[in-house]
Image (spheres, rainbow, N blue to C red):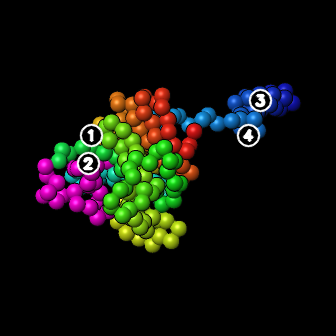
Amino acid sequence: MRGMRRTVGAILAALLMVLAAGCSFATEDPDYVPPAPLPPLEQLQQVPVTEQTTLSAGEEVTAFVTADKSIVCALTSSRGGHLNLPYEANSYSDAANNKFAVVPVAHCELAKYTAPEPDDIADDCAGIGLGYLGGTALLTPEKAVYGSCRSGVTQMESEFGPEGSRDGPISKLRELAEGQNIERNGLRCSAYNGGVACGNVSGGVAFFVSREGYQLISDGGKTVAGNLK
C-alpha cells in the first residue's frame, strides 16, 4: 500500500513538473522600444487593401472617417478643381464643368490642424478674397498639396472641431480602422500612426496628415516637405 502511495505521489509530482515546464509568464520588458511606424508610401504599399464596399458613399465616392473622428477623407474625383464630396456643398455636377477632364483624387479634412509651412502654400488666392488655410489635403496622381484657398470652417471642423456639433453627414460615415488600407482608381488611403496617409504608390507621391502636422511626399519618398520630419 505504501509502495502504491509512493508511486502515485511520484506520478503527481512528475505531472506538476511537466505542467510547470509548459507554462510561461509574460513580463513587461522596461527596455522594449516599439518599432517606428512605416513611412507613408511603405505603409500604403505593404498593408493589404481592406474590403471597402461598406465605405461607399455613392457609385463614384468612397468616404470614411477615422475612429477618433479627427479626419474625414474621400477617394473621389475632380473636374476643373471642383471636388465631388458627399459631405461638402460643391459644384462638381454643374453642367459647366462637363468640359473638364475627370481626375481621380483623395481629399481629407481635419477637425484640428496646423498651419501650412510658407514653402507649402500652393496658391496666392489672388483676386478671390480668400485666405490660404490648412486643415485640408489633396492628392492627385501627380502631386500632394496641404491647405487651400477658403474662408470659414470645413464640414469636418463644424462637426468635430473644438466647437463642433457632433452631428451631420460626416458623423454618419463608416470608420476606417487603424492600420487598414482602402483603394479606388489607383489611389490608396490608410489610417495609421494617429492620422491618415493617402498616395499614388506607383507614382511615388503621397501625403500624411494628423492633428500634429503633415507631410508631403514626392519622388518615391526621396523628397518630404511639411512640418513633420
- Estimate how packed mark 2 is, as few (under 14), some (14 to 19) or many (20 or more) residues with alpha carbons within 10 Å: many
20 sits to left or right of 130 = right
Q: Are marks 4 and 2 in contact (CB under 8 Å)?
A: no
Q: Which amino acid does the dot numbered 3 rest on?
A: Met
Q: Are marks 1 and 3 in contact (CB under 8 Å)?
A: no
Q: CA distance from mark 4 to mark 1?
A: 44 Å
Q: Which secondary structure class fits the magenta region best?
A: loop
Q: Are marks 2 and 1 in contact (CB under 8 Å)?
A: yes
Q: Residue at x 27, y 43 (%)?
A: 104
What is the span of residues highlighted in magenta in the rendered image?
A: 75-99
Q: Which amino acid does the dot numbered 4 rest on?
A: Glu
Q: What residue is disc 2 on?
A: 77
32 sits to left or right of 200 = right
Q: CA distance from mark 2 to mark 1?
A: 9 Å
Under circle 3, the secondary element is helix
Under circle 1, the secondary element is loop
Q: Residue at x 37, y 47 (%)?
A: 138
Q: Which mark is residue 17?
A: 3
Q: What residue is disc 1 on?
A: 185
Label 4 vs label 2, nearer the camera:
2
Residue that protrudes farthest toward the front in the picture = 127
Pointer 4 or 2: first along the chain: 4
